[in-house]
Amino acid sequence: MLSGMMSSRFHTSLTLLERLRFPSEQEAWRRFARLYTPLLFHWTRRMGLSSDDAADLVQDVFVTLVEKLPEFRYDAGQTFRGWLRTVLQNKWRDRLRRQAVRMPVAADGNRAVLAEIEDSRADSLFTEAEYRDWLVGRALELMKSEFQPQTWQACWEFVVAERPAAEVARELGLTENAVYLAKARVLRRLKQELAGLVEF
């Protein structure tokens, strides 16, 4: 019993990225999938893929992530966004190559067209600001249930809605200090959850 509690406490103190290195961490993989699936779908749809093709590509990416993430090591010189972008683009290129091979007429011309489409779309899909906004927003949605509603609301109104702490405190029946503490608690948890996945 005690060892189970200690193990649970150990795992919850780790970042999500660290927890993905443990094969038994099914909850971490579920959390990761819930966190990243909307972003990957957003990116693939912006590539011009249909819903079905986007779903297939996202599935291909997750197969690779299941294989590679346990070995992934955070490197301050390389962002996780950049690494994920590479995985997604490689899977996309694989699909484009397979499509080009199946095109019987003017194969060389088709390959050139596909390569041009790939290059023109790729650079505009993965800005750091967009990635950060999507990931932080999604993580906050997933974390909401971990906090008392009043704590969550205080942080949300103060940080996201950018309302003055005094105004939020009055509305929620809190002290200004309680609003600052709510912000600190939620943001501390957010940073712990996303360490290595996004730069703060």
Image (tube, rainbow, N blue to C red):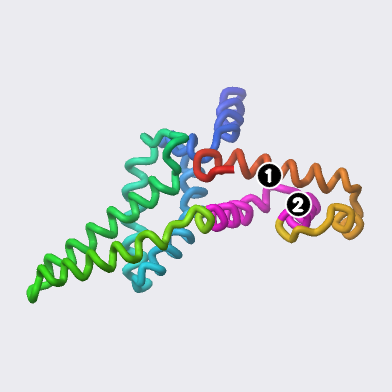
Tally the numbered discs.
Answer: 2
Compared with 177, 71 (above or below) is above
In the rendered image, which quarter is residue 138 located in? bottom right
Amino acid residing under circle 1: Leu
Asked if labels 2 and 1 touch by Cβ distance under 8 angstroms, the answer is: yes
In the rendered image, which quarter is residue 68 located in? top left
Residue at the extreme top: 3
Give the position of the C terminus as an image quadrant. top right
Residue 188 image point, x, y percent: 67, 40
- Name the residue rendered at 36%, 34% in the picture: 71
Residue picked out by circle 1: 187
Residue 144 image point, x, y percent: 67, 53
Sequence-first disc among 1 and 2: 2
181 sits left or right of 119 in the view: right
Can residue 157 be found in the magenta stretch? yes
The secondary structure type at the circle numbered 2 is helix
Q: Nearer the viewer, residue 30 or 151?
A: 151
Residue 66 image point, x, y percent: 36, 45
The circle on residue 150 is none
In the rendered image, which quarter is residue 160 located in? bottom right
- Name the residue rendered at 34%, 50% in the picture: 86
Query: Which secondary structure is most common in the magenta stretch?
Result: helix
Residue picked out by circle 2: 155
Between the C-alphas of marks 1 and 2, the distance is 8 Å
Compared with 75, 79 (above or below) is below
Q: Residues within 10 Å of mark 2 (few under 14, many from 20)?
A: many
Residue at the extreme bottom: 105
Give the position of the N terminus as an image quadrant. top right
Magenta-highlighted residues: 132-159
